[in-house]
Image (cartoon, rainbow, N blue to C red):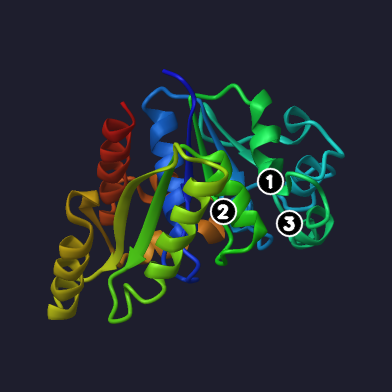
Amino acid sequence: MTQKIIAVVNQKGGVGKTTTAINVAAQLATSGRSVLLVDLDPQGNATSGLGIAKDQAVTMYEVLCEAAQLATAVQETNVAKLFVLPSNSNLAGAEVTLVNQANREFALSQALQTASFDVVLIDCPPSLGLLTINALTAANFVLIPVQAEYYALEGLSQLLNTIQAVKRSTNPQLELLGIALTMYDKRTSLGEQVRDEVQKYFGDKLFKTLIPRNIRLAEAPSYGRTIFEHDRWSKGARSYKALAREVRDRLV
């Protein structure tokens, strides 16, 4: 299997993006693949969500700005075959550092050339700035988590336009892997309406698995654990296991 790079993107915050990146990465690793989770968000939630301290000597910022090699920054996690490239608030300065550099959109792509993992997932910041453009330029695929709420599709047209712009300029091979509906509540008609709307718009790009609202999913990051470590029998764990299986099947 050649290395697959997936950018997990949505410029809206609070849609389950980091939760999706962490748990899909963990489940893919459990299924036998070597997986690198790249924390490209200055908030560092994917880092802390995997139990890694943010105050590492070498982080995503140093790698992106060519002050350090990727291998010196990668950290092991408690999940076998799952590794993380950590981030912290220093990364917020990367856009300023990169903006005047030639080929600034390719900084992450160049850094990942030395990576030797089956799958790389990039947890993007909730914006469409230079960091996200770097992720889209480096990636083969885009996974978009969408919250099952009234304004679910608000802003998605801008994201899709950005993806198309990247395909035209820096990464013509970029593909939409799929849309993952998160925070789904089957008890409400709104959830069904949003699902139907997303299905109508994206067709078979909508993953069949629906990620429910689940208190165990919300708790897990505060313990620095994946949902499988925190409560492997919860609805959230079962759902992310199923979603990861769909992701794996689409990567083949």
Residue on which the image places disc 3: 88
Gap in angstroms between the C-alphas marked 2 and 1: 11 Å
Left or right of residue 137: residue 216: left
Of 162 and 2, nearer the camera is 162
* Residue 200, quarter of picture: bottom left
Horizontal and vertical percent for residue 248? 32, 33
Residue type at mark 3 is: Asn
In this rendered view, identify the residue nearer to me: 232 or 140: 140
Residue 220, visible in the rendered structure: no
Q: Position of residue 195 (x, y in %)?
A: 18, 67
Q: Indicate the secondary structure of the residue bearing disc 1.
A: loop
User: Foreground residue, 203 or 144?
Assistant: 203
Q: Residue at x 44, y 54 (%)?
A: 164
Q: Amino acid at mark 2?
A: Gly
| Residue 76 shows in this picture | yes
Q: What distance separates the C-alpha of mark 3 from that of mark 2?
A: 12 Å
The amino acid beneath tag 1 is Pro
The tag earlier along the polypeptide, 2 or 1, is 2
Which residue is disc 2 drawn over?
49
Vertical position of residue 153 compared to residue 73: above or below: below
Work out whether 238 lies above or below 144.
Answer: above
Question: Helix, strand or loop at disc 3?
Answer: loop
Up-down relation of residue 52 to residue 213 (above or below): above
In the image: residue 40, left or right of residue 196: right
Circle number at residue 86 = 1
